[in-house]
Image (cartoon, rainbow, N blue to C red):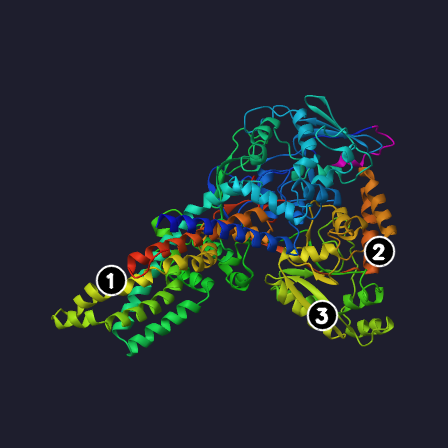
Amino acid sequence: MKKWLVSTALALTLALPAAAQDYTPDPNAKPGGTITITYKDDVATLDPAIGYDWQNWSMIKSIFDGLMDYVPGTTTLRAGLAESYEISPDGLTYTFKLRPGVKFHNGREMTAEDVKYSLDRVTDPATQSPGAGFFGSIAGFEAAGPDGLSGVEVVDPLTVKITLSRPDATFLHVMALNFASVVPKEAVDALGSDFGKQPVGTGAFRLGEWTLGQRLVFEKNADYWREGVPYLDSVVFEVGQEPVVALLRLQNGEVDVPGDGIPPAKFTEVMGDPAQAARVVQGGQLHTGYITLNVTMPPFDKVEVRKAVNMAINKERITQIINGRAVPATQPLPPSMPGYTEGYAGYPYDVEGAKKLLADAGLADGFETDLYVMNTDPNPRIAQAIQQDLATIGIKANIQSLAQANVIEAGGAGTAPMIWSGGMAWIADFPDPSNFYGPILGCAGAGDGGWNWSKFCDEALDKMAVEADSLSDPARAEERLKLWSDVYMGVMEKAPWVPVFNEERYTMKSERMGGDDALYVDPVSIPVNYDYVYVK
Amino acid sequence: MAGYILRRLVQSALILVGISFVTFVLLYVLPADPVRQIAGRSATAETVENIRRQLGLDQPFVVQYGRYLAALLQGDMGRSYLQKTEVTELILSRLPATLQLMSAGIVAELVLGLSMGVAAALMRGRAGDQLLMMASFVTVSAPQFVVSLLLLYVFAVKLGWFPIGGYGTAAHLVLPAVTLGILGSGWYSRMMRSSMIEVLRADYIRTARAKGLSGLRVVLGHALPNAILPVVAMIGIDIGIFMGGIVVVESVFGWPGIGQLAWQAIQRVDIPIIMGVTLVSALAIVIGNLLADLVAPLIDPRIRLR
């Protein structure tokens, strides 16, 4: 990525060769073998335009490819189906050169037409893609429909030119999202809504078998365009398995990775046994758990009150409730996210200070409010801890423990004064600070039904955010991150959230699983990066 | 008889329409928006509105229900909001597993419940009777999740007699069926006990004994066949209770039945699936009740169907 540092004053265009920085293959890796992954829930769909849960996200990644991709186990962008790309000096035109000879699972060669078709499809309202909004910076997005995007042009069979209506520093990340995966038109046309059950992509694995409600089998794509991968012959996903049962089966040698992780009730037991703990890989994830304070509802419209709540919450104690599977948070961004403000300590835990702030706001006697929480363990327990903390400064919070969909509804409608985000918390779609702002802290998400449950809308911060994202010149990346850091510090000043903790990831694997630990806590592929792990 | 069946079938159809209406109303007033679930967290307001329009969820209740009912009458249960697969396909792919588990579970609860009931009746008033009746209380009130996990842990993990959950072979079926059997046996053992006690008091039993038949022959040859019939007629009604219990058991044992499907659909507010599973379950109960009523006169000639 060194070439990114070339100044635009000197170069008219920026070009990035494909192998600028890539993954070093594991010398111990050997091909062959089958692994078994379990999940509680059935897989909803494998259509890359539709699939948007953490379970099918990594599965879709292994069946499809986009123009961009990430170096396995990291958040570093690398070229995918694009061999190279050029960005115009004004940051408005991206020209992607495609890798020649890449074949879909149906044997046909992938071309620029497929890239255009796939982007047209995901933005067409008829597709009902939950990810359509990510492509908002492409020219012609507003008029997207059956006629396709005017901003995406096929130059020749191996060249695609994408024109943006505004500079977008996150555009390459967007092209690495599953929603930007390249799909073959003829397969989508033939299968219609059933494409999600019989997916055809260019990825490292093809779908071999799908018995609804029971299992899916991914088979190795022997013609995969990346040399040497995948290592595994097949991956079996068994669905409908309780996490506790999956753990028992792992201990019995029947399962390689329990997809839902270690059940909370069993966590202490597993980590207390050295033999089992040795097979657990720990890593950070781009996650923040927070309490939203609805700034449109008194008394949370007063910044003193919001600050007081921030100072009343004992975050250390809350992380203990979840057996220390998290680190206390100081700000909206998780520590592993670019743009995180190092050295910022956040609001201190200070009960006396909090009481004083409440008194300043004219609420020395406290007040009564509602705290909404999703009703699955450990969230109600965390809500109780928050309730107790608030009681120490005189706030009486009534816990409203509801099903996930009902909490989301109350949050979107703006009828919930406080929400503990557990079970619905933000996990980044892509490793960029902008992804933690727009939908959850920006004005765009503050409308009715949006995910900005604080209904926090600060025009000045929104302007800074837009400014930051228009700095698409890679040479100004540092400047951009600084700007984002300022945006989040501005958010903390207004205190619409109480950032509580950043969850850590714990992936358990069987003894025979091989590959770098980073592959088991891959920030993009959860639980593991299927393309690069292997059987010892 | 034919007239009776026809009338009952018409009634059953009306009941199903009624159930579809009530369920639809409940899902309509539920404070959870299915469109939000489909659109996901990053969707813009336009995307959300667009999806709402395409699914017809922007229409008034009457229009929505009318459309659903019209499609349903043509055998179309719609497509899942999130999976985009036809609900009929989803249900049909899972129904065999549920029916299999249900049949095995009913056999298990009958074998367990009836033998417990007979034994208790024969030991009436003694310690054995009280012990068995206490056990029936425990099994009726035991949490399904705990019983399932306990059996799984002891017989599959510790002893290794059965596979740890899953579906496919007869060995996979044993533990979930026995779990359902244990949980349901309490009702049957109590019913069987009282029915048996009543029969044992009857004149013809005394006659049989007076003829000099052995105790065992009296019980097996005369008392049991008469006592068992009213209990067996219970099965039809029991299907409803069964449908409820099966959700948890399927989930613990990883049994790919419609209980699991329903559970996931409820989490995700996937209305077409919830409607479909509810209607199929209701249909099973309606058929069960109908069969119970049809069997009744065969058991007891005093009952007349009109």
Q: Chain of mark 3?
A: A
Q: Mark number for residue B225?
A: 1
Question: Which residue in the protein does label 2 denote?
Answer: A490
Q: Secondary structure at mark 1?
A: helix
Q: Nearer the viewer, residue B296 or A133?
A: B296
- Please give the label number shown on residue A397: 3
- Label 2 vs label 3: CA separation? 27 Å
- Residue A11 magenta-drawn? yes
Quadrant containing the C terminus of chain B is bottom left
Residue A163: x and y, percent? 79, 30
Q: Secondary structure at mark 3?
A: strand
* Precedes in sequence: disc 2 or disc 3: 3
- Relative placement, left or right, of A463 versus A112 is right
Residue B216 is situated, as x and y percent measured from the top left of the image, at: 18, 68
In x, y percent, where is residue B84?
A: 58, 40
In this rendering, which labeled residue sits more in front, label 2 or label 3? 3
Labels 3 and 1 within one chain: no
Dot 2 alpha-carbon crowd within 10 angstroms: few under 14, some 14 to 19, many 20 or more: some
Q: How many marks?
A: 3
Question: Does residue A178 lie above or below A417 as drawn?
Answer: above
Chain hosting mark 1: B
CB-based contact (under 8 Å), mark 3 and mark 1: no
